[in-house]
Image (cartoon, helix red, strand yellow):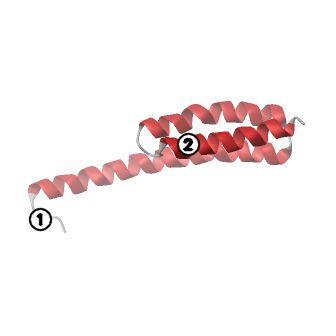
């Protein structure tokens, strides 16, 4: 348990950051799920559109420290390959 004023303040800050980061992660997952659903339906146009909407959200998560740059790049790369494969 936090005893010093500094540790109590850090605990409060951590709680706030946790809620903010949780909301960001949830929003990113929602966008990624929309891409996955469009891919599974086989609609390349919808998948492409969903991917274009998901990309800035994922990169915003990187800049805010929710995801690592390599993780986001890997996710985008794999999704874009799958979207591209729909057209073939």
Relative to 2, 84 lies left or right: right
State the image coordinates of residue 47 (x, y, percent, origin top left).
76, 37
Residue matched to label 1: 3
Foreground residue among 83 and 54: 83
For the residue carrying disc 2, how many other residues have a C-alpha within 10 Å: few (<14), some (14-19), or many (20+)?
A: some
**Which residue is outermost to the bottom?**
1
Q: Is residue 87 visible?
A: yes
Q: What residue sits right under mark 2 in the picture?
A: 72
**Could you classify mark 1 by the number of other residues whose Cα lies within 10 Å: few (under 14), some (14-19), or many (20 or more)?**
few
Classify residue 54 by image quadrant. top right
Which part of the image, by quadrant, shows the N terminus? Answer: bottom left
Quarter-of-image position of residue 2: bottom left
- The mark closer to the camera, 2 or 1, is 2
Look at 85% across and 39% down and name the residue there.
86
In the picture, measured across the screen, residue 64 lies left or right of residue 85, that is left
The residue at the point 87 percent across, 35 percent down is: 87
The residue that appears at 34% across and 48% down in the rendered structure is: 17
How far across and how far down the image is residue 19, in percent? 39, 51
* Residue 25 image position (x, y, % from top left): 50, 48
Label 1 SS:
loop
Q: In the shown orientation, is residue 72 left or right of residue 12? A: right
In the depicted view, which residue is nearer to us: 64 or 24? 64
- At horizontal 72% and vertical 38% (from top left) the residue drawn is 80
Q: State the SS at label 2.
A: helix
Q: Residue furthest right?
A: 88
């Amino acid at each position: 348990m936090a005893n010093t004023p500094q540790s109590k303040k850090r605990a409060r800050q951590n709680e706030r950051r946790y809620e903010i980061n949780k909301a960001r992660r949830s929003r990113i997952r929602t966008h990624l799920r929309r891409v996955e659903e469009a891919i599974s339906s086989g609609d390349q146009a919808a998948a492409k559109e969903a991917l274009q909407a998901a990309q800035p959200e994922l990169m915003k998560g990187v800049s805010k420290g929710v995801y690592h740059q390599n993780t986001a790049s890997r996710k985008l790369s794999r999704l874009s390959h799958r979207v591209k494969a729909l057209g073939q």
